[in-house]
Image (cartoon, helix red, strand yellow):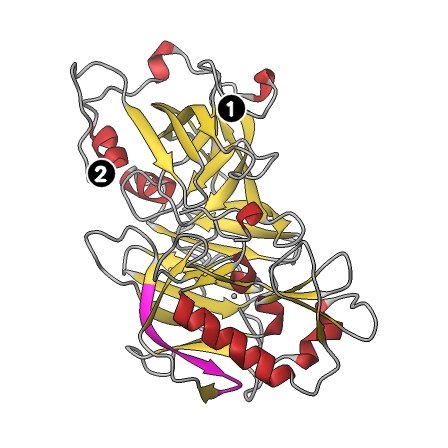
Amino acid sequence: MVLSASLHGCLAAIGQGQPPKKPTSIHPRAGFRSSVFLPVSGNVYPLGYYSVTIDIGNPPKPFQLDIDTGSDLTWVQCDAPCTGCTLPRDQLYNPSKNNFVDCKDPICLSVNSPNPPQCKNPNEKCCFQVQYADHGSVLGFIVSDTFPLRLVNGTLSKPHLAFGCGHCLQNRGLHPPTPTAGVLGLGKSKASISSQLSSMGVTKNVFGHCLGDNRGFLFFGADFVPKSGMTWTRMLQSSSDKHYSSGPAELLFGGKPTGIKGVNVIFDTGSTYTYLNLKVYETVLNLIRKDLSGKQLHDVKDKALPICWKGTKPFKSMRDARNYFSTFALSFTGSSNVQLQLPPENYLIVTEQGNVCLGILNGAEAGLGTTNVIGDISLQGKLVIYDNENQMIGWANADCNRKFGSF
């Protein structure tokens, strides 16, 4: 469920009223050592996305992919030929006849779940179509090819993974953001990269990300899961929900209850900003405006986002603006003392004009109905882990800008 920055598409934290936690130390654990580590580049503003570069094929060809926990299928722009592709032809994926997946292949069923593919002939090519929340769409064929991946133990693994060969793109200007070649789908289904790597015994079905100011990292496998310092909550289980959802949670502001309870949220790195349903959004906006009463901030128009303020002089960074605002938190009521802290730097941006703008948006205006989405802005500065083996989501404060060498 990708929500592009162009759509104005989401929240994270230093707890007000409680001391900030020391960043969790992140390093590979001894033992299993079957994990993959990938550098991440990007930012919330002004780019609006985070991406990784992955080699595909033999000989390997690099593709920059938008990382997305909100959708399952990985796909790349494909020379089949392509309508709506934005990259030069020599940068497109060029499949051979042997790369195409048959309609009868089990992965084709996973990609098209819950609706089985309509196969007139079991040997015909497996098709796919992905619809995104920003009204963009991708149509194409499922293919399989080599993904050369360097494991943290130094060995090179070359699994054959299934992915989408996208040859008909609509609203490509919205999703994925230029100049990415496609999407790295990290959802829960069997079609996701994490699930495929697990089924082949390459890594465990665990992955995590750490998103910094302009860089970060992504990993597959259990070697980077800290033994302590993580806050964990259980994933919601629903046959109709393929997203990484958790809840219910109570919304706190400045450490105090807001009266908003029963909030379920989706963790979605394909969304730049946080989207809340109308009731929660209006509550958040009213609390912020009340909190700003008497402070030297005034409403201002800014093309970056719908709700913005200016100070007595332009803000240079969030460090200048954060003291005007308080901390939100989501307190997960099904667990003991489990909170996702959302400090000012995880729900606000400072624009090129020196204004401070609200990175929490009205989900109803984006066509999301009652869905609440926690996007990149709220996940910055945190190690977030999706443990599909144990059906848990965890997070901890971390220095995502730290440079990592080889392990």
Q: Position of residue 212 (x, y in %)?
A: 62, 58
Q: Which residue is drawn at 58% across and 16% down?
A: 89
Q: Nearer the viewer, residue 187 or 151?
A: 187
- Residue under the image location 60 percent in, 60 percent down: 306
Residue occupying the far top of the picture = 97
Say whether residue 252 is magenta: yes
Can residue 229 be seen? Answer: no
Residue 24's place in the image compared with 168, above or below, is below
The answer to whether residue 324 is magenta is: no
Main secondary structure found in the magenta portion: strand
Which residue position holds label 1? 84
What is the magenta range?
246-255
**Separation of disc 2 and disc 1 at Cα?**
26 Å
Q: Quadrant of residue 402?
A: bottom right
Q: Can you say whether 204 is above or below 88 in the image? A: below
Residue 113: which numbered mark, if any?
2
* Percent of width and height locating residue 202: 36, 40
Question: What is the three-letter code of the residue carrying label 1?
Answer: Gly
Q: Which residue lies furthest to the right in this view?
A: 313
Q: Which of 141 and 299 is in front in this view?
A: 299
Q: Is mark 2 on a helix, strand or loop?
A: loop
Residue 255, percent across and down? 49, 87
Q: Which of marks 2 and 1 is nearer the N terminus?
A: 1
| Mark 2 crowd level (few <14, some 14–19, many ≥20, 10 Å Cα) | few
